[in-house]
Amino acid sequence: MGKAPSFDGVTIHESAYVDEPCEIGKGTKIWHFSHVLGHTTIGENCVLGQNVVAGPHVQIGNNCKIQNNVSVYKGVVLEDGVFCGPSCVFTNVNNPRAEIERKDEFRQTLVKRGTTIGANATIVCGATLGEYSFIAAGAVVAGDVQPFALMAGVPAKRIGWMSKQGGKLDADLKCPIDGTQYVENDGSLTEA
């Protein structure tokens, strides 16, 4: 096993692989059996749990938490503060076949700031997940998701709204955690 490159202020477990070139921000931790492929950028204060694969050519923002057994493939962009639950899945081709190479058909998936993706959820490539959206465990997201939307089911449908703090909003649209008031206009949600 080759020695991983050294990054100032970064913890890389001895069983993890980090290919060069890549950029990793201070305070980030990369745990057991994970692999960061070349041309990947990881921000500050991130945690990549056990058996995480990131890259190649992936962008991960600051303060992201990627739980065990997640692969973040080429074409996926995680903005700041994204949480990826254990074993969630990102696809990169819409109609894969083992006998047909489709690497030139990778579709970008954009996961915007503060989004939570639950355990075992699947995000089909080409989707944009809006800021602070919340994807329930086991959901299958096959299209764009509005900011603050709570998505569940197969295929995923909006079943409610979530606050920035991660509180499920009732009919009054007031965050049960910090009291922030939200307003619904034309089927979308914003802070009041």
Image (tube, rainbow, N blue to C red):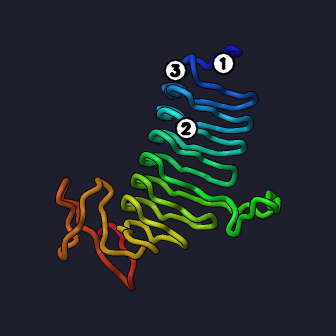
Give the image quarter of residue 6: top right
* Relative horizontal placement of residue 159, taking residue 35 as reference (left or right): left
- Which quadrant is home to the N terminus? top right
Q: Secondary structure at mark 2?
A: loop
Question: Which amino acid, by three-letter code, is at mark 2?
Answer: Val
Quarter of the rendering occupied by the C terminus: bottom left
The residue that disc 2 covers is 52
Residue at label 3?
Answer: 11
Q: What element does badge 1 sit on?
A: loop
Neighbor class of circle 2 (other Cα within 10 Å; few <14, some 14-19, many 20+) is: many
Toward the viewer: 39 or 69?
69
Residue 102 lies in quadrant: bottom right
Q: Is residue 122 left or right of residue 94?
A: left
Q: Nearer the viewer, mark 2 or mark 3?
A: 2
Q: Which residue: 27% across, 69% down?
A: 182
From the top left corner, tell me how far across and down residue 70 is, in percent. 53, 45
Query: Is residue 122 or residue 65 the one in the foreground?
Result: 122
Labels 3 and 1: the sequence-earlier one: 1
The residue at which mark 1 appears reads as 4
Give the structural element (helix, strand or loop) at label 3: strand
The residue lying at 43 percent from left, 67 percent from top is: 147
Q: Which residue type does callout 3 highlight?
A: Thr
Tell whether 186 sits left or right of 174.
right
- Which residue sits at x=44%, y=54%? 120
| Cα distance in 3D space between marks 2 and 3 | 15 Å
Q: Amino acid at mark 1?
A: Ala
| Above or below: residue 33 compared with residue 164 | above
Give percent across and percent down for residue 72. Answer: 60, 47
Q: Picture coordinates of residue 167 (x, y %)? A: 24, 58
